[in-house]
Amino acid sequence: MLLTITTTHHPATDLGYLLVKHPDRLQSFEVSGGTAHVFYPEATEDRCTAALLLEADPAAARPSRQPDTFTLRQHVNDRPYAASSLLAAAMGRVLRTALRGDSRDRPELAAGPIPLELRIPALRCKGDAAAFFEPLGWAVEATPVPLDTAHPEWGASRYVDLTLRGTLRLADALNHVYVLLPVLDDAKHYWVSSDEVEKLLRAGTGWLAEHPAKAVIARRYLAHRTSLTNEALSRLSDGVDTDSVGEPPPRPESLASLRRAAVVRQLTEAGASRVLDLGCGPGALLGELIRDRRFTEIVGADVSTVSLDMAARRLRLDRLPERQQARIRLLQTALTYRDDRLRGFDAAVLMEVIEHVDPPRLPALAASVFGHAAPATVVVTTPNVEYNVRYPGLLEHGRLRHHDHRFEWDRAQFGAWCDEVAARYGYTVTRHGIGEEDPSVGASTQMAVFKQ
């Protein structure tokens, strides 16, 4: 998916200072769901265009609100091609400074309007794009994309080729697109929780409160969560945005970060130096492990070659020094089958893995990991389904935390599984919570540490 940003401000190459991306360089960034590239198809003093190209993984990008009636949806969908919340998330990661309106080198330019043209060649558009962008000062050209150019009688698809032209502050322009991409698509690729309200109010500062379609924008941006939508609209009506409350409060550490830290702490306390990350996915934990010199041999294993490719890019394996490259390997394997390459390690991690396995296959996974590979320490984390009541709207819609979860256990169910596995394969086991401990429902994530 693609977003281009063009200006004819003179000198137009000052766009590079505002985006903090040099026009002479191709830059790549690992983002949620894929890899983002920033480059400049044209860069002269009269006209300059910056392009943000996102290569998305279709298996990681299915909209969270789509029903699961099509079993191949996670592999066959429009997410790698049609602009969506994936592109908005990439903007937030790659263009963070420009979205804030900061520029160390051109502060006066960042503070004022410049002529801009933004284009998104493929955007799934529910409704009239002009109704959302024109009140913000844009001239809007939304050209329907035909279903098939060879068969014009089939009519238009649900996608448009969107071009926006106007003279605006770059930060305002980017924040308009950041918010309205998932609004027009009417879907998000991740679960929407209460922190999305803060994101919406922050990105909508100065324009959302007066927008004639603010109710629709809030409802769609917050994935039709009634309680979150009401909170956002109430705060907009009261004039409570990031301008009126000053600097936003520091964000608490994310659950994913707390989870990785807890796992690494257990591995360190076990004295492990040779570690398996089983079901490593795109390599978030591997990144933590490779930064710690105590781990001398690290193996990431996953059934998905797409995930392994993403992990390799995330870790920049081809750019690591030779000594670092020697510490880490990536293996394609199924955890429900015995694999001699996984034997002989000090520790193994199953971080947010078991809930992705069909329950009838769990005994095979246990036999493979605890019986055949048999590391001295095994660390397992999984969601605590009891805590789901603390996520607004999750239970009322009957959803698990991720579309690919086959189950989520409460603490008693997880404890029973842990005790059975430990007894069968000769381990002792202790259990812990990760994240804030709720006196009624426990912590969001539950962790078990098995030791021989």
Image: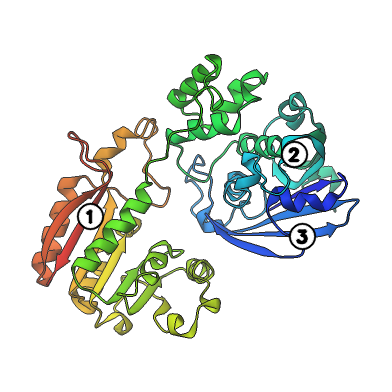
Nearest to the observer: residue 361 or residue 239: 239
The one of 357 and 15 positioned closer to us in this rendering: 15
| Front disc: 3 or 2 | 2
User: Residue 341: horizontal and vertical position, in percent?
Assistant: 33, 83
The vertical placement of 403 against 43, above or below, is: above
Q: Using the rendered image of the protein, determine whether residue 406 is visible from the camera's viewpoint.
A: no
For residue 29, above or below residue 142? below
Q: Secondary structure at mark 1?
A: strand
Residue 408 image position (x, y, % from top left)? 29, 48
Whichever of callouts 3 and 2 sits on the residue coming sooner in the sequence is 3
Quarter holding the C terminus is bottom left
What amino acid type should be assigned to the residue bearing mark 1? Met
Distance from disc 3 to disc 2, alpha carbons, whole Å, reads 20 Å
Q: Is residue 169 left or right of residue 182?
A: right
Spatial CA span between label 1 and label 3 = 46 Å
Q: What residue did someone put label 2 on?
A: 108
Q: Specify the amino acid type for callout 2.
A: Glu
Q: Is residue 45 left or right of residue 60?
A: right
Mark 1 residue crowding within 10 angstroms, few (<14) / some (14–19) / many (20+)? many
For disc 1, the marked residue is 447
